[in-house]
Image: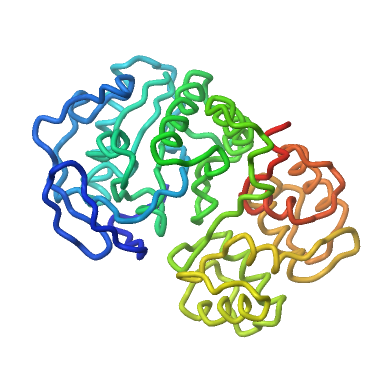
Amino acid sequence: MAIHEHEVDRRTLFKAGLGTAVAAVVGTEIAFPVAAGATPSPEFPWIIDCDTWGARPPSSPIQITGNTTNKIILHHMAFPNVTDYSREHAVQLAKDCQNLHMDKNGWADTGQHFTVSRGGYVLEGRHRSLETLDAGQHQVSAAHCPGENGNAIGIENEGTYITETPPQALLDSLVELCVAVCQKFRLNAWDIFGHWDFYTTDCPGIAFYAQFPQVRTRVLKALGVPASAAPARRWPDIWRFVDGPVVEVAQYLLVNAGYTDLAIDGVFGFDMNPMVADFQTAHGIPVTADCTFDTATWEALAPVLYQDATGLPVQAVQFMLARKGWADTVSITGAYDHTTMKAVQDVQRLHGLRPTGKVDLSTWCAVVGGTVRESFAA
């Protein structure tokens, strides 16, 4: 996985700290020293905390973000798919990951908040992640996804899942962990995304990503939330500090809307700021902070596509389909051909949508990494 330490998330700064600790404001984050003698969580005793698995101390103070946590991002670790499912292996996994992140990447600590082993053991990643989960107020600022480190809980899943799927024990524990995060940070099942929804990477893997509708549905049921309560569409809320394939799709659509000076490169540069604001204003959409692509912005940009459609929006769909498992059949031609339609139908089936082959708003949302209500009834 490609991730960066100290990626700044510029959101509203909250003054609130945790407990009685004294905090020092650092940019938009709140820096706390690591508490001495931290104890396992009484609420989540099944999560192996840093002290218990023998974590090294972080090389610099852990930072608590002032942002509001608004999503969970799932990863695969790109580690071997081992058959040692023991607790001892899970502990060694956590140590190996921390050593890699600190010694090779030069980060302060483990990059993610939590780790799930192939044997189903859940371990705290970055120090104080478990403490802040208990509190459910402001999360630890992590290093798992640039632009999202201060407002997304990052969960690493042991293994590599391009062609293989995770073991059942891992999936069961992942669901339990996602439920806990949702309950404590007031999230829901539709707030679960994959790493590649916000960054250029193969993580969380094509085969694992295809299981996300099932994972989300299990989380929803465990939370006791009816499918009817899900929003019609939960789009990836890309913003000024997020780069990657979804940004590239947004650029295709902005150029199609007339902003022809915009480069289609997946980089959310400052040149996009006035264009997004102008588009929003022209369509009666409130201008969002940091040029965030909210639901209204996405849905004003995305045209309905069907057979015989051509142009940049078709290229955008083909580009994303090729990244998410259909590279062998879908080419980026800008012509809505039969192979593109078949891939679109596959996506629709996966997310519980009628396989019409027509790229309507819900299909667009599913293609770019969002969640649709129908997927919970599938």
Residue 201, percent from left and from top: 50, 51
Please tell me in which quadrant of the rendered image residue 352 appears: top right
Residue depicted at x 81% and y 44%: 345
**Numbered circles on residues, count:** 0
Residue 137, percent from left and from top: 32, 44
Please tell me in which quadrant of the rendered image residue 310 appears: bottom right
Frontmost residue, 180 versus 257: 180
Residue 144, percent from left and from top: 38, 48
Query: In the rendered view of the protein, which quadrant contains the C terminus?
Result: top right
Compared across the picture, whether 15 is left or right of 308 comes to left
Residue 12 vertical position relative to residue 277 in the rendered view, above or below: above
Please tell me in which quadrant of the rendered image residue 282 appears: bottom right
Compared across the picture, whether 89 is left or right of 159 comes to left
Q: Residue furthest bottom?
A: 261
Residue depicted at x 78% and y 66%: 334
Frontmost residue, 378 versus 255: 378
The colour scheme used here is: rainbow
Residue 74, percent from left and from top: 47, 40
Q: Residue furthest left?
A: 36
Frontmost residue, 1 versus 169: 169
